[in-house]
Amino acid sequence: MECYASLAAVPELKGPVHLAVGMFDGVHRGHCEVIGGAVQAARQRGGVAGVLTFAPHPSRVLRPEHPVLQILDAGRKARRIARLGADFLVEEPFTRAFAAEGSEGFLEKLLRAIPQMEAIHVGRNFRFGRNRTGDVAWLVARGRELGLHVFSANAIEADGERISSTRIRRLLTAGKMETANALLGYNYLSDGVVEPGRALGRELGFPTLNLAWEQELRPAFGVYAVRARCVGAKKWLPGVANYGVRPTVEIAEEIPPKLETHLLVPPEEVRAAGLDSGSALEVEWLRFLRPERKFAGVAELREQIAADVAVARFFFAEEKGAADRL
């Protein structure tokens, strides 16, 4: 997938272009309906499928005192979009000048940048232009005049409620990881380079792989059942992870959170997987086990980690049993 930093940077494209437009924060199941629709239509027409999104989130420009915290950073969002089959991605800078453009100006800008555009794909609640005055009905009517097809994807519901980024944000910050994953359509994931720690986990008998991972929208601090692997590897290894500020062992009051993962396999299997300091690690978050809290000392912490490991092992045994019954 080709990535462009603005509409002005998009080169001349061959074939009819089907463009999905939206913020697509989280690239959840509802977003997949929009992007997948563009990809499928482009393939049927022998054309090109693109995605237009914006950075930063409009709230950062229009109401910076109350910004919308993003589920995915730009890199992980791009990777999720690429997996859906898009041929190119445009991340248009969102500025006050851009926000001031009317609906007609927005559409004209799209057509100047991508004159080969045959169709626009949006969500049902898509709004655009100055003061969000443009909507799907306006876009359909104007598109008809210009010979431009407009497709509006139906909302996807789960448990009687629309799947939305706002709903998923609430779930993540509450630690409701399994429900969040169901709405995302994939397991929430962290990635980064394993960095050396203080070896406290090893001293306690539970060595960890440590990521100084901090997302704009922080999931609930606490202990999770996870699975991990080297980036690009096929095999996932079960684990238990703590995400937070480690109040039992840290002295400083304000420190960045870390994700510390203990794998539930023998050390030789960890080494065989190539997981060590400096490794590129992926961690999928599967179930919230308990909130992070401060213990009286390392002895009490060790006992709790042992209990967390036992709970995580039971989770994976349950998961395997359910899979075997299918």
Image (cartoon, rainbow, N blue to C red):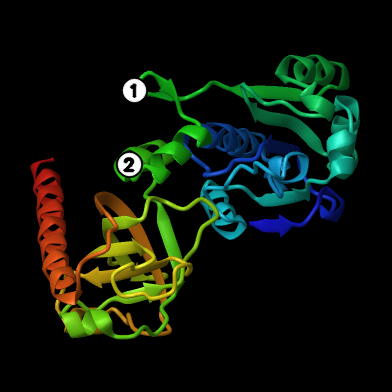
Task: Please determine whether, in this image, residue 132 is positioned above or below residue 253.
Answer: above
Q: Amino acid at mark 1?
A: Asp
Q: Quadrant of residue 98?
A: top right
Q: Quadrant of residue 20?
A: top right
Residue shown at 34% from the left, 83% from the top: 276
- Residue 124 position in % (x across, y down): 61, 21
Mark nearest the camera among 1 and 2 is 2
Task: Please determine whether, in this image, residue 109 is positioned above or below residue 235.
Answer: above
Q: Residues within 10 Å of mark 1 (few under 14, many from 20)?
A: few
**Image disc number at residue 159:** 1
- Residue 138 position in % (x across, y down): 79, 16
- Identify the element where label 2 is drawn: loop
Tell me if label 1 and label 2 are in contact, CB under 8 Å.
no
Residue shown at 88% from the left, 38% from the top: 109
- Residue 228 position in % (x across, y down): 31, 66
**Image disc number at residue 176:** 2
**Image disc number at residue 100:** none
Whether residue 56 is visible, yes or no, is: yes
- Residue 281 as seen in the image, left or right of residue 214: left
Mark 1 or mark 2: whose residue is earlier in sequence:
1
- Identify the element where label 1 is drawn: loop
Give the CA separation, mark 1 to mark 2: 15 Å
- Residue 320 position in % (x across, y down): 13, 52
Looking at the rendered structure, the number of numbered marks drawn on it comes to: 2
